[in-house]
Each structure stands twice: as structure tokens, then as C-alpha cells.
Image: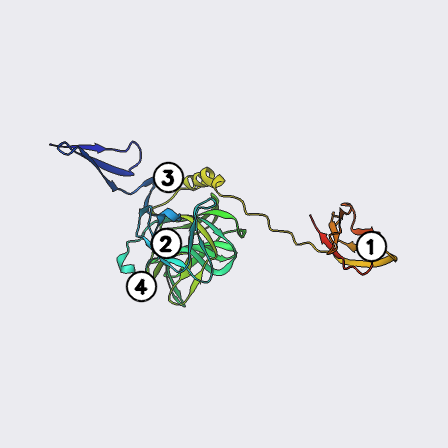
Amino acid sequence: MRKYFRLLPQTMKKASAIMKFHSASGRLALLISLLPVLVHSSSGADARLRAHYLFSPDRQLHSELKPSAGGPGARIEGPIEFTKATLPPRAEFNDREGSLIISDDFSKLSLPTGELSVEAWVRLDKPAEWGAFIGAIQDNGSYERGWMLGYRGSRFAFAIASENARALTYMTSSTDFEPGRWYHLAGVYDGASMKLYVNGTLENSSEAQSGPIEYPPTGFYQIGAYHDDDEYYRMQGAIHEIKLYEGVLSADAIAATWGDRRDEFPDPRPKPQIVSPSYGPFMDWTGRYQARFYWETDDAMPTRYTLDSPHGDVREGHSDNSVTEHEVTFDNLKPDVEYFFTIRFP
């Protein structure tokens, strides 16, 4: 005897499951079939999740990154470090080699054409003239097709080429990104306008494109690099997550994602401040066994100093933190001994 039980989700259409109970063997089998996730926007439009990539070590299987939903998977090209040793889980990219190729054959893909939304959690470590977090693009002279979410110089960028325009519009953020900082990005195209969101805020929009997205017949659908027939520019930084939707993500949904998850992403570590004396240090003999050391700093600050010799004679101290002219005098120095004087800035 075989009984079937269907589990229906309580809210959104995420998945359906059928449990099969085999009374003869006592085995319980759970079959799960995934259905597209529908994200409801305040405008009434639905954005259907087509692909979800989470860049965590447990999503890596040999030389492939397995999608969390949708697909297809991405082939790992070159050295990419998948890590969650420190949060968030991520893939670390360098700008010399390494990227993720989802496909190099557009004929096998079914990408969104009328409406598209793409969002990503990313960290860039340095700007570059051209770069993409994800894209399916050709920009070869006057031949421009596809789309990408990435960056131009020190600003984030979202690009679309529609059938009506037959050329790419590269729309950039209104502010520069800070290297080493995590950002949430979203690019939205509704068939008549483009929008670029950074950390939940609309930073740019354009109506230069309209109509279906025009894809090239051949090209690369890729993560972590701006790649077409003429260029191959890899990013330096990290990606935590990318989601691709068919449809329009609302401004409220994008802002909510940023607000709900922003605390998961740490601020960049402060860059070490390189400080050196603006003058000196110098030494004068003020007596037969006495020496004076002096130096200057541009700003009033304390400095620590050490005088030591190979015989273990170590003398330490610090100068006043309210002056720019510093000095210290040492007595009872031994003749024919090599001393080492060191300055440190706390």
C-alpha cells in the first residue's frame, strides 16, 4: 500500500514536496521539486527568482559553484578562494586570474528579456576602468549587446542594451565606492527605464533604453569579470551573493534587503597610519658620557623611544603628547659600545 501526502507552503510559492510512505518496507522518501520564488513588490509586479548564487565553501563541488536556486552552475576558472573563516562567506577574487563562467554558449541560456533585476553583495578592493560582478555582454566597437552589473572606475555601474536602442547605456552611481567596504547593489530594468540602487538607495536612473533586452548570439555569461570578445578584466575583491530575477524588484524590497542584512557585513579595517618624523632624529654629544637625541613631528603627538645595546642595557620612555619638538638625554653611556636608538609612534 502506498500513501501520498502533499505539503503546501503557507506563504509564497517556494517549493512543493511529496512524501511517499512505503508501508511494506517502512521507508519514508521525500521528493522535493523547486518552483520559482516570487518576490512581491509594492507596485504589484512580481520578480521571479531565476538564479541564486551564494559564494560559500559548501556550495563548491570540485571545479563548479552550485547554485542555491535556479541555475545553471558556474565553472570555476583559475584560483578563487571560497572562505567563511571570517564572515560573511564569500569568494575572494584577484585581478590577475580567476573567474566563474556560467556559460560560454548563449544558445543554451534562457535569460530574462523583457524585465530584469539583479542584486549582489560585493566588496571591491580597488577601482578599475572596466569591471563586472555578473554580466552577459558584448561591447566591441559599435557592436553592443547584453547587460552587466559592475563598475566603471571608482563607481558602480549597471548596463543594458535593448532592441530599440541597440547600444549599451552604462549608468553609474552618483558616489564613489570605498575600497574594502561591503555594498548591496541592485540593478533594475522594467522595459522602459533603468535604475541603480546602492545600499538600498536609488543612485541613478535612465530612460535611454526601452523594449526587450538584446543579447548577442555568442558571448560569456560570467561572474567576477568583465569579459567579451575584446576584453577580459577580472575584479579584485569579494562576492557574497548574487540573485537574478525576471521581473522588477521594488524600491521597498531593495531597501528592506539592505536594512535587514547590513549588520552581517563588517566595516573595513582602518588603514594603518604611516607616521615618520618630519625632522630627525639627530644626536649631539653633550658630555663625555652623555648624549641628546631630538626630532620633530608635523603634528603634536607622543612618541615612544628605546635605547639599547648588545649587552642588554635597555632604556625606554616616551615624549610629551602635546609638542611637535621632542628630545631626550641619556647619561652614563659606556665608551666603545654600539647603542641603537628607536622611535615608535603609538
Q: Is residue 139 visible?
A: yes
Look at the image and tell me whether residue 159 can be seen.
no
Distance of mark 2 from mark 4, alpha carbons?
A: 22 Å
The residue that disc 2 covers is 210
Mark 2 or 1, which is nearer the eye?
1
- What SS does tag 3 mark? loop
Look at label 2 and name its amino acid: Ser
Please report whichever mark, 3 or 1, sits nearer to the chain's N-terminal start.
Answer: 3
The residue lying at 47 percent from left, 41 percent from top is: 264
User: Alpha carbon of mark 2 to alpha carbon of mark 1: how far?
Assistant: 82 Å
Location of residue 127 in the rendering, given as x and y in whole percent from the top left corner? 52, 57
Q: Looking at the rendering, in which quadrant would you find the N terminus? A: top left
Q: Mark 1 or mark 4: which is in front?
A: 1
Q: Which residue, given by chain and number where applicable, does mark 3 sit on?
A: 41
Q: Amino acid at mark 3?
A: Ser
- Please name whichever residue, 272 or 170, is drawn nearer the observer in this view of the structure: 272
* Residue closer to the observer: 146 or 339: 339
Pointer 3 or 4: first along the chain: 3
Q: Which residue is mark 4?
A: 218
Q: Is residue 118 or residue 61 the one in the foreground?
A: 61
Circle 3/circle 1 CB separation < 8 Å: no
Q: Earlier in the sequence, mark 2 or mark 1?
A: 2
Q: Position of residue 319 (x, y in %)?
A: 77, 47
Marks 2/4 in contact by CB < 8 Å: the verdict is: no
**Precedes in sequence: disc 3 or disc 2:** 3
Q: Residues within 10 Å of mark 3 (few under 14, many from 20)?
A: some
Left or right relative to 19: residue 90: right
